[in-house]
Amino acid sequence: MNDPIVLVLLILGLLAIIIIGWIISTTNAFRRMLIKIDESESSIDVALTKRFDLLSKLFQAAKGYMKHEQETLTKVIGMRQPAHGAPIAEKQEFANQITRGLQAVNVVFEQYPDLKANTNVMKLMDATVEVEEVLQAARRVYNSNVSYYNQKVVVFPSNIIANWKKFTKRAFFEAEAIKREDVKFDF
């Protein structure tokens, strides 16, 4: 008679160990995913900072030619990098502002071919292209990490732990509105 009770207790104990192990493992998986998201967000911060620094240097190089673009120059110089840990939407708006600043610089370069031919300006423009590629790669990694995490937050059975431990979906880093516009070709 004790044998069935012992067997039932053993099975219940084993089941409890499996459930507790699953809870711990799933909670730790969510925490690892959040660390990966924070790491990839940090890569975006680094690329945005480098992009801003290059934009500032480009403006300094073009300053003499940009007397009529003084308002744009003042706005760009006044931009400040969002703090680490700021919402992704704030970082996205910062990226959009830098894009608008780069477009203003490109307009000036088109108007002044001798400025565009300047060796230092050419190096800065090449560095800007490289930073843009790094930024795009950082955004892809961030969005990939967020996608994986968000899937785990909403899909059964991991959503049980997500709801219990208050893990919520994270926002994607969206494409800049300027880059979503249709390209117009003037021939």
Image: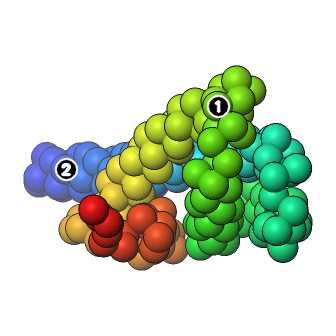
Q: Disc number at residue 7?
A: none
Quadrant assignment for the N terminus: bottom left
The residue singled out by tag 2 in the image is: 11
What residue sits 53% from the left and 37% below the top? 129
| Left or right, 91 with reference to 135 | right
Residue 103 figure quarter: bottom right
| Left or right, 116 with reference to 28 | right
Relative to 86, does residue 19 appear above or below in the rendering?
A: above
Given contact means CB atoms under 8 Å apart, are the residues at marks 2 and 1 in contact? Answer: no
What residue sits 75% from the left and 43% below the top? 58
Residue 11: percent from left, percent from top: 19, 50
What residue sits 36% from the left and 70% below the top? 180
Q: Nearer the viewer, mark 2 or mark 1?
A: 1
Frontmost residue, 110 versus 148 = 110
- Asked whether residue 180 is in view, the answer is yes
Residue 13: percent from left, percent from top: 30, 50
Residue 89: percent from left, percent from top: 59, 72
* Dot 2: element: helix
**Which numbered disc flags the more N-terminal residue, 2 or 1?**
2
The residue singled out by tag 1 in the image is: 117
* Dot 1: element: loop
Badge 1 crowding class, 10 Å Cα cut-off, few under 14, some 14 to 19, many 20 or more, is few
Frontmost residue, 13 versus 46 = 46
- Asked whether residue 79 is in view, the answer is no
Callout 2 amino acid:
Ile
Quadrant assignment for the C terminus: bottom left
Callout 1 amino acid:
Ala
| Left or right, 49 with reference to 93 | right
Frontmost residue, 172 versus 48 = 48
Badge 2 crowding class, 10 Å Cα cut-off, few under 14, some 14 to 19, many 20 or more, is few
Disc 2 to disc 1, C-alpha distance: 78 Å
